[in-house]
Image: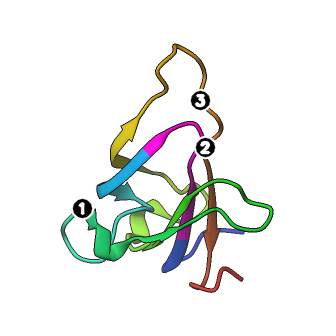
Amino acid sequence: MPLGEECYIQLFLPLDLEVQFKFVVAEGIFHPKGNSPQLSTSDLNILPPSGNELRQSILFFGCNKATTIGNNPDGSAEISAITSQKAKMDSGPFSLSIFKDEDRT
């Protein structure tokens, strides 16, 4: 099913990375409404681990640019700042879910 305009994006972050949400620079499907690509902390709903999901996540409004949705949606999000582990190793998984409403139904 093609991705339509106006959605909520939930980005799940690995447990082994320390994340400080100062801002997110978003493009494509992640781009906020308006001209600025920057999501501030007031645009982000930071969700703690809960239930079966042990990872922290952020929920924000997206899918605002018609040219980046449809059958082949694309985009990028740069989070400021993520701190890596002290040892050289792979991190846990990042994942993404897209919902039509803020209640994530």
Q: Position of residue 64 (x, y in %)?
A: 39, 74
Image: magenta residue range: 9-18
Q: 70 or 33, which is in the foreground?
A: 33
Mark 3–mark 1 contact, CB under 8 Å? no
Residue of label 2: 15
Quarter of the image where one finds residue 27: bottom left
Q: CA distance from mark 3 to mark 2?
A: 8 Å
Q: Residue at x 57, y 57 (%)?
A: 56
What's the residue type where badge 1 is placed?
Gln
Q: 39 or 52, which is in the foreground?
A: 52
Q: Residue at x 72, y 69 (%)?
A: 1
Asked if residue 6 lies left or right of residue 99, the reply is left
What's the residue type where badge 3 is placed?
Ser
Q: Position of residue 55 (x, y in %)?
A: 64, 53
Q: 100 or 59, which is in the foreground?
A: 59
Task: Reply above or below: 86 against 50.
Answer: above
